Amino acid sequence: MADEATRRAVSQIPLLKTHAGPRDRALWPQRLKEEYQALIHFVEQNKAADNDWFRLESNADGTRWTGTCWFIHELLRYEFRLEFDVPVTYPDTAPEVAVPELDGKTAKMYRGGKICLTEHFAPLWARNAPRFGLAHLMALGLGPWLAVEVPDLISKGHVVHKERQREAAAE
């Protein structure tokens, strides 16, 4: 059973209707349109709540996504590149989000900087496919992962804020 915060997050993101992946040439454009609409709604909602934390863009066919995400910790903004490919079995299979610059810095990550979402997010996605989309991936996958991992990485000294890196280099 999902907790109340999860239910609230999901209820604010539009569910998708078209069950199509990149191989479905006829329905993929409709699914991609729904993905963009849900992402735009989610970003607007985050901005209204002063919780803007990522930017995404895709290639022309919507199969490769890149962008940045950030996390505020002790009033400092830590920014990271992110990337993922939409799997050919999408939407039945969730994309694997990678944060390449954190590769090897935490056990909750696979080779290439792919974040581990198998324990909590994968079962949730499986129960809700094909209604979940990329906005859900960000809200229920990457967002919680950043909230848990980034403060831990900072406390262990694996991630250092850019300003502190410059100060250390200047000394």
Image: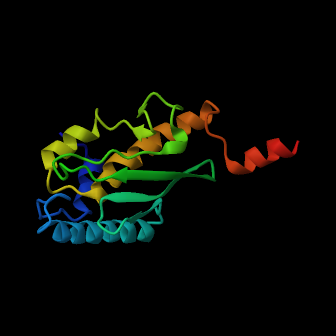
Q: Position of residue 130 (x, y in %)?
A: 14, 54
Residue 159 sits in quarter = top right
Taking the spot 55% from the left edge, 43% from the top edge, the residue there is: 101
Quarter of the picture containing the C terminus is top right
Q: Is residue 26 left or right of residue 105?
A: left
Q: Is residue 137 above or below residue 101?
A: below
Quarter of the picture containing the N terminus is top left
Of residues 154 and 55, the one drawn nearer to the viewer in this rendering: 55
Q: Is residue 170 left or right of residue 85?
A: right
Q: Position of residue 3 (x, y in %)?
A: 25, 43
Q: Position of residue 156 (x, y in %)?
A: 61, 30
Q: Is residue 122 above or below residue 129?
A: above
Taking the spot 42% from the left edge, 31% from the top edge, the residue there is: 108
Q: Is residue 143 above or below residue 154?
A: below
Of residues 13 and 74, the one drawn nearer to the viewer in this rendering: 13
Residue 109 sits in quarter = top left
Q: Total label count?
A: 0
Q: How is the image coloured?
A: rainbow
Taking the spot 28% from the left edge, 34% from the top edge, the residue there is: 118
Q: Is residue 89 left or right of residue 82?
A: left
Q: Position of residue 89 (x, y in %)?
A: 17, 48
Of residues 143 and 24, the one drawn nearer to the viewer in this rendering: 24
Of residues 51 and 83, the one drawn nearer to the viewer in this rendering: 83
Residue 154 sits in quarter = top right
